[in-house]
Amino acid sequence: MVTTVSFKKKPHSNGDATTHANGESEWSFLFSLTDLKSIKQNKEGMGWSYLVFCLKDDVKLPALHFHRGDSKPLIKCLEKHVALNESPHDERVLLVKTQKSLSQSFENLFDESSYGLLQKWKKDPYIVTMGKFSKVTNYIVGSLRSSDTSNQRRPPSEMADFLNDTIPGLKINQQEEPGFEVITRIDLGKQPEVSRREPVSAEEWAKNMDSEGRILDVDYIKRLIFKGGLCHTLRKEAWKFLLGYFPWNSTKEERANLQKRKTDEYFRMKLQWKSVSEEQEKRNSRLRDYRSLIEKDVNRTDRTNKFYEGEDNPGLILLHDILMTYCMYDFDLGYVQGMSDLLSPVLYVMENEVDAFWCFVSYMDQMHQNFEEQMQGMKTQLIQLSHLLRLLDSGFCSYLESQDSGYLYFCFRWLLIRFKREFSFQDILRLWEVMWTELPCQNFHLLLCCAILESEKQQIMDKHYGFNEILKHINELSMKIDVEYILCKAEAISMQMMNCKELPQTVSEILGIENSSVTPDSDTGEDESGAELSCPTSLYQSVSPAVIAANGTRDGAPQTAETQSLAPA
């Protein structure tokens, strides 16, 4: 017989599989090898190892994951009892040909030699390369025992020690449960109810400025913007501060002098590409390629917006000229598909070529790694998102992995251009200005991803979506997401994590939480210092009454969406 280890579910669990009345998880399973038809393995080199067992009645059991190594030791053990042959149609599938004697107990999986091999999984180079994803797994190789479970079952204390040694960070509850060990995970508690306020008004902005034009209380203004955004008339001025073009402590006179210097600098760079003759451009393939790609993308960027619609639109000309000038500013990066999406809202708000350029430069300083050839920024963000989502909802993460979607590549476009294609144009203005406050923690955009995914989890899992269905479903969310609902939910998740007393060190670093009582990656999570978690409670003070609640109904009505392919260059 083969059985799994299941998690014990707490009252406010953060995403375990559903626990039945008898205490067993719906993900736990037990079957006889006489019923085994085939075993599907993950593609070699593609993420964590897992096995999916298919029985003779074509029932597929939940994926069994190996987050600290690979599945080869288990396969080797199974081959002592059944003959496994590679399928001629799919090299990932092992077919059960004939049965061997089942008299030998599966307890030998946990003998000393196997135990030593499991310990070596910790040194798996792929796990190290991927930054050691979460310590807490949703599926764990459990006790494999013969039919005489009363005689063959290992003592709970021995199994608890084994799992603690193999997977640091797990806490084993050694109470007696029939058929499996109970593992207690980090409990994030219930998500708090969060609400938002009205956008910052021109009057509020003016009241927080002295006679020379300095912002009096930067933190207060940022809190207001985070909680409600800006009224549109303020954006042209406030975005220059949020993006770093204007220093927060500058006077009105200092900003005027800065704009004058930056205007001269901009037109000098613009003249560089404007003065290149056709003959010169024929000998400059990179500039020629940049121009060709920019012209192609500009002609299909936000053409349904009045600011960019129609032929020979002055907005399109400015969009083109700013992107070409940016190639002169950063010739190594030049232009990469997707950058026009980042510039378009900025130019729309600024309505000025020079201001839009320098705000775009500041935005690209934040986004630069997303567009570099190695795309290290994208890889890092996907890994960080996996950490956060696993802590928030490990059951959902494990389901995605079982459907070959554990890499979260369907979030690629979200991260590459900061949700530009997922929300309406006006909603993106609101979303971006909230993110630019850098509140309530760093990498808040990753929590926005978590909020969207958690909102869609129920449908994805209840309808048993596979790889293609998940990708299709996520793509079809475009223009159907309620920005205020998602902002509330993401803020609630941030509070939930920042209030956690046992926050893993990796997650703490991703969110930029310092002086907190965090769970180090290498130990059980006990913090001897007794330090309190640093949570920015001031964020939720001194703001106007809220107008939208986190548990409000989402508006699922589809809106007109511009379809445009987006692939990294």
Image: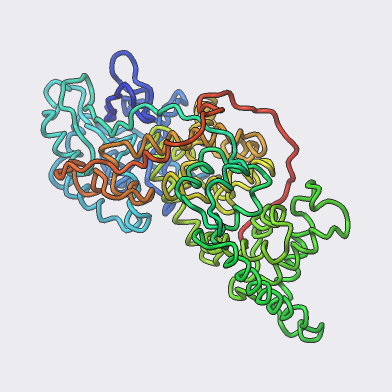
| Residue 279 screen position, x and y as percent | 81, 86
Taking the image as shown, residue 69 lies to the left or right of residue 466, namely: left
Quadrant occupied by the N terminus: top left
Report the number of numbered marks. 0
Tell me what residue is drawn at x 75 percent, y 38 percent. 560
Residue 532 sits in quarter = top left
Taking the image as shown, residue 523 lies to the left or right of residue 34, namely: left
| Residue 529 screen position, x and y as percent | 15, 45
Tell me what residue is drawn at x 68 percent, y 42 percent. 426
Tell me what residue is drawn at x 67 percent, y 63 percent. 355
Q: Is residue 97 visible?
A: no
In this view of the protein, which residue sits in the foreground, 500 or 475?
Answer: 500
Q: Name the colouring of the figure.
A: rainbow
- Position of residue 165 relative to residue 53, above or below, is below
In this view of the protein, which residue sits in the foreground, 197 or 464?
Answer: 197
In this view of the protein, which residue sits in the foreground, 72 or 424?
Answer: 424
| Residue 305 screen position, x and y as percent | 78, 47
In this view of the protein, which residue sits in the foreground, 50 or 160?
Answer: 160
Q: Is residue 483 visible?
A: yes
Q: Residue furthest top?
A: 21
- Position of residue 517 relative to residue 257, above or below, is above
Taking the image as shown, residue 62 lies to the left or right of residue 164, namely: right
| Residue 294 screen position, x and y as percent | 73, 65
Quadrant occupied by the C terminus: bottom right
- Position of residue 196 relative to residue 521, above or below, is above
Q: Residue furthest front?
A: 211
Taking the image as shown, residue 154 lies to the left or right of residue 13, namely: left
